[in-house]
Image: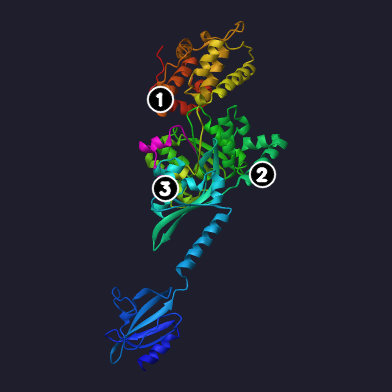
């Protein structure tokens, strides 16, 4: 077969072909005149093509532009009596103009989507932010394009989900969270985050967001209507599922609290795991039970455990369960993850969980399977996890007291309950509420608070929050004589009198360190003082003290030992 015959055969599959000899002179060609320049047999190919960067190796491909058209040229080597070089021309159908038009169309499509789209590059800078995302988050794309995610949303880059996905190459599915706030109102969106990979390497990350506000409002209205029309049967259901609180039990008048209730109700509609952060006495379990009863899981079990009240070895078997023979005395016992079934598992004071157990918990939350201690069998985890923390998670992570990966797992959504000192209007509300409530409960009528005491209570920082205020009002009603004209500072317990009198007499707060010190120090000092005072009040009757503090006897014994408290000999 001649070289020209081979060329004619190949010509059927390409737009043009030129055959060269070993000196790279043209021996034969068959090309379309409208595509290529006119060439002559015997001329050097370098007269028509810049060959400086072409090695003419077999199967080498290089781009070529002729008459404004883009071509891909593939080199094929052939040997018979001599060596020949075949240059096979194929027009690139998608020219640069066509590619620009295609990109323009894709951008227009993204802009018209109902779903929000946001994309960041390898540096974490926002490079795409469509109109739907603008409406969901209340931001303007012109103000944020080209800026780092963490500067736009004001958070630590260490906690960036986009960077986490970029570094791991793993998508994040179905998160429900507010990253922006408009006029003090958090803008919640449901979103998933995905990596964009090329040749096995992540080059960008994007998130798809949906706004479910209309659906949430309808579900909220339906649930509220059902509760109003069937209160009796609902209350009975609550007592059966292991809860006693609903959102109607959360009292207060501040805008911060009312907004927080609405936020928690919206989150409850989804099955996302949630982290509740707040100081002691702010009502974290109250919110967790209310969220359970507001969700579609309301008829399922609500199971609560205080991670600080149980030793590490018992906590593991309590959460995961055991099989007979796992250790001395072990029996076949179901763990709380399995016991909660399709309901809610509430992990209170999760920041007290030892680091070794945190890694095991993280694995369970990641895989959604639990293995009993001493067993090889896996059981699915179907419940929603609500965790509570009384310290700042960022500080805990910085101090290596909480694993960062565990934080990512438990905080699909998060709620921060502001302390009572940041809600002055609620202090006034609770003073009147507890006065009325405990007068009825104790069957005792008492006079009003004096102006001196009223002002002092409003300025006190309440490190024990609502629980501390409630116990104080109860104590006042018990102490004040029925013939008294008003309740004054003289009727306060001695430990509170020394704190409140300087506040009024100087009209300034003499203990700023209570506010400025870290949350942990405030929590520990106040907790020890509160426990010690309550124990003295009931003559060290642990059961009565636990009841007054609103905790279990076992939990109180743990905190007595934790703070080194001892019963006086006399």
Secondary structure of the residue carrying tag 3 is loop
Residue 58 in which image quadrant: bottom left
> Is residue 64 depicted above or below 531 in this figure?
below
Mark whose residue sits in front, 3 or 2: 2
Identify which residue, 324 or 522, lies in the foreground.
522
| Residue situated furthest right in the rendering | 229
Choose the circle earlier in sequence order: 2 or 1: 2
Secondary structure of the residue carrying tag 2 is helix
Secondary structure of the residue carrying tag 1 is helix
Residue beneath label 2, please? 218
Do the numbered discs 2 and 1 sit on residues whose CB atoms are within 8 Å?
A: no
Mark whose residue sits in front, 1 or 3: 1
Choose the circle earlier in sequence order: 1 or 3: 3
Instruction: Report the magenta residues as a range.
Output: 386-406
Mark count: 3
Left or right of 429: which side holds 201? left
Residue beneath label 1, please? 516
Identify which residue, 528 or 247, lies in the foreground.
247
Residue beneath label 3, please? 374
For residue 52: magenta? no
How far is disc 1 from disc 3 in space, using C-alphas? 47 Å
Residue 93 appears anywhere in the view: yes
Kindly identify which numbered label has been placed on residue 318: none
For residue 396: magenta? yes
How far is disc 2 from disc 1 in space, using C-alphas? 43 Å
Q: Residue at x 57, y 46 (%)?
A: 135
Identify which residue, 302 or 406, lies in the foreground.
406
Left or right of 230: which side holds 353? left
> Is residue 520 depicted above or below 451 in this figure?
below
């Amino acid at each position: 077969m001649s070289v020209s015959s081979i060329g004619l055969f190949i010509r059927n599959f390409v737009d043009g072909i030129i055959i060269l000899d070993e000196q790279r002179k043209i021996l034969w060609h068959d090309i379309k005149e409208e595509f290529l320049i006119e060439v002559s047999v015997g001329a050097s190919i370098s007269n028509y093509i810049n060959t400086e960067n072409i090695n003419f190796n077999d199967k080498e491909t290089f781009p070529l532009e002729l008459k404004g058209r883009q071509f891909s040229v593939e080199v094929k080597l052939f040997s018979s009596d001599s060596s020949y070089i075949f240059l096979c021309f194929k027009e690139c159908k998608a020219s640069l103009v066509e590619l620009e038009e295609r990109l323009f169309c894709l951008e227009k499509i993204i802009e018209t989507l109902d779903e929000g789209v946001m994309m960041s590059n390898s540096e974490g800078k926002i490079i795409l932010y469509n109109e739907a995302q603008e409406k969901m988050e209340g931001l303007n794309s012109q103000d944020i394009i080209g800026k780092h995610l963490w500067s736009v949303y004001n958070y630590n880059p260490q906690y960036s989900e986009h960077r986490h996905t970029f570094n791991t190459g793993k998508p994040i599915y179905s998160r429900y969270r507010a990253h922006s706030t408009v006029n003090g109102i958090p803008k919640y969106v449901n979103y998933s985050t995905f990596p964009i990979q090329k040749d096995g390497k992540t080059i960008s990350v994007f998130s798809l967001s949906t706004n479910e506000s209309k659906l949430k409002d309808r579900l909220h209205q339906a649930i509220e209507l059902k509760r109003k029309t069937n209160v009796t049967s609902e209350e009975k259901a609550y007592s059966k599922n292991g809860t006693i609180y609903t959102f109607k039990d959360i009292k207060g008048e501040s805008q911060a609290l009312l907004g927080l209730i609405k936020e928690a109700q919206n989150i409850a509609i989804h099955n996302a795991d949630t982290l509740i952060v707040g100081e002691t006495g702010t009502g974290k379990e109250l919110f967790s039970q209310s969220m359970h009863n507001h969700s579609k899981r309301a008829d399922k079990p609500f199971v609560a455990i205080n991670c600080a009240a149980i030793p590490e070895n018992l906590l593991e078997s309590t959460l995961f369960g055991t099989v007979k023979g796992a250790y001395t005395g072990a029996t076949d016992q179901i763990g709380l993850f399995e016991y909660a079934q399709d309901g809610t598992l509430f992990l209170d004071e999760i920041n007290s969980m030892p680091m070794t157990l945190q890694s095991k918990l993280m694995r369970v939350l990641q895989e959604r399977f639990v293995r009993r201690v001493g067993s090889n069998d896996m059981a699915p985890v179907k419940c929603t996890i609500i965790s509570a923390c009384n310290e700042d998670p960022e500080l805990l992570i910085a101090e290596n007291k909480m694993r960062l990966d565990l934080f990512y797992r438990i905080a699909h959504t998060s709620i921060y309950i502001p302390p009572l000192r940041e809600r002055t209007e609620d202090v006034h509300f609770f003073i009147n509420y507890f006065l009325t409530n405990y007068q009825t409960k104790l069957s005792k009528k008492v006079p009003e608070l004096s102006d001196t005491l009223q002002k002092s209570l409003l300025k006190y920082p309440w490190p024990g929050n609502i629980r501390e205020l409630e116990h104080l009002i109860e104590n006042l009603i018990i102490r004040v004589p029925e013939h008294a004209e008003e309740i004054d500072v003289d009727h306060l317990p001695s430990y509170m009198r020394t704190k409140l009198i300087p506040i009024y007499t100087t009209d300034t707060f003499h203990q700023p360190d209570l506010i400025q010190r870290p949350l942990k120090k405030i929590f520990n000092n106040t907790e020890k003082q509160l426990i010690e005072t309550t124990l003295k009040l009931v003559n060290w009757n642990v059961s009565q003290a636990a009841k007054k503090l609103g905790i279990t006897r076992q939990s109180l014994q743990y905190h007595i030992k934790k703070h080194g408290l001892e019963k006086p000999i006399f």
